[in-house]
Image (cartoon, rainbow, N blue to C red):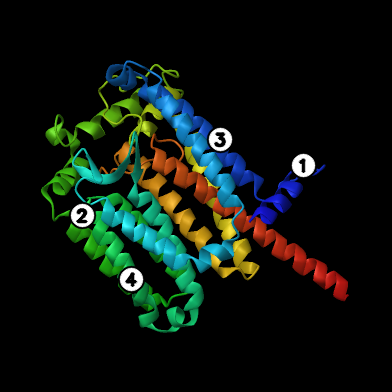
Amino acid sequence: MTSSLASMSSVLFNKQWQLPFDGVLLMTVLLLLTVGTVCMTSASTEIADGNYQNEFFHLKRHLVYLTVGMLAALFTLAIPMRLYREMSWLALGIGFVLLVLVLVPGIGRDVNGSTRWIGLGGFNIQASEIAKLSMVIYTASYLVRHLEEVRTRYSGFLKPVVFLGVFVFLLLLEPDFGAAVVMMSAFMAMMFLAGVRASHFFFSIVVCLLGVAAIAVSQPYRMARLQAFLDPWQDQFGSGYQLIQALIAIGRGDWFGVGLGNSMQKLYYLPEAHTDFVFAILAEEMGTVGAMSVLVLFAVFAWRALKIGRKAEVAGQLFSAYIAYGLTIIFSMQAVINIGVNTGTLPTKGLTLPFLSYGGSSLVISCMSVAMLLRIDYEARRAVSSKGSQQESAS
């Protein structure tokens, strides 16, 4: 690992200043992190001042999370992808243990009726964030080991569904319906891109959709959210309150916003303004132009991440390719769901907006996931370069 980091550093700081991985992806993430820090700070000042008598309380913690995330990303960048493949069962086990621990009384921490966090002193670990990454690593490893069976027999598709089902069941016990949907989406996308038969895939999609629909109507609070999504004004001071306040924030933003720091909705009108609804505050203060710019950044991120996956696949590094595809879907789904909730196009779900929302676990895991994408690109480039050198030598 040390030699790997040293070789990467020597390339990174050479005279041509040429990055050994996708610079567009890295710049896009840095822009998202910068915008996120500014918007989260603006959205959190009032609630931080009211709760902690320090308007920069959340900013200070966010900067700590960001520092930890950057350090974790540097460490992740030095780890060869083959180690993840060799430790895929360990990754799956870690994800499972964390999802179980969060449900144990005295260990799991309840916030707003959901037990999603494991308390560690003054900090919390959100088990679902690690579990999603664990499932992606395991699924990629399984696909490489059983690719022929996955492509030809339904049994190859069903075997990993057992582990997925266990993870989803544990997530629903928290409950964390949003994380369960994101995890299932990433799993199904990875299977599809690995070449599973269309008949097997679409049959499973139908089963998953029926299951999601059944889960969505199985609890009264979920039904209330669906009704509020369809007509938030039916219960404007109850189940529809958050959506109405988010729509007011977006409407006030118009084209160019009311100005950074001038949001009215963050003044205790919009709950969770710095976490789940930071996009609404962004749209209020920076307007449609600012909101669309963030959408463009997420689109660029997805494009470059998928390109990295394709590059790894062409280079014959299938495990890395499937990891890249899975991570792309996780980031994209979380962004789509969060923005959809903020704009009223999807029912309310407690999912953070990657890189922008306040939250330590989300930010650290996101940074590590980006580092994995950069590592995949680095190894794919090396493989292509090595292959080209061998062909030149042969000729």
Give the residue at mark 4: 161
Amino acid type indicated by mark 2: Leu
Q: CA distance from mark 4 to mark 3?
A: 37 Å
- The answer to whether residue 346 is visible is no
Can you tell which quarter of the image residue 254 is in? top left
**Picture disc at residue 31:** 3
Pair 1/3: label in front: 1
Q: Residue 226, image x and y in percent? A: 19, 46
Q: Residue at x 28, y 66 (%)?
A: 165
Q: Which of the 4 image quarters holds residue 186?
A: bottom left
Measured from the top left, where is residue 56 in percent x and y?
41, 20
From mark 1 to mark 2, how far is it between C-alphas?
Answer: 49 Å
Give the distance between the C-alpha atoms of the residues marked 3 and 2, in whole angstroms: 36 Å
Q: CA distance from mark 1 to mark 3?
A: 20 Å
Q: Which residue is mark 1?
A: 17
The numbered mark, 4 or 2, whose residue comes first in the sequence reads 4
- The three-letter amino acid code for the residue at tag 4 is Val
Instruction: State how far apart marks 4 and 2 are (Cα).
Output: 18 Å
User: Which is closer to the viewer, label 4 or label 3?
Assistant: 4
Specify whether residue 355 is in view.
yes
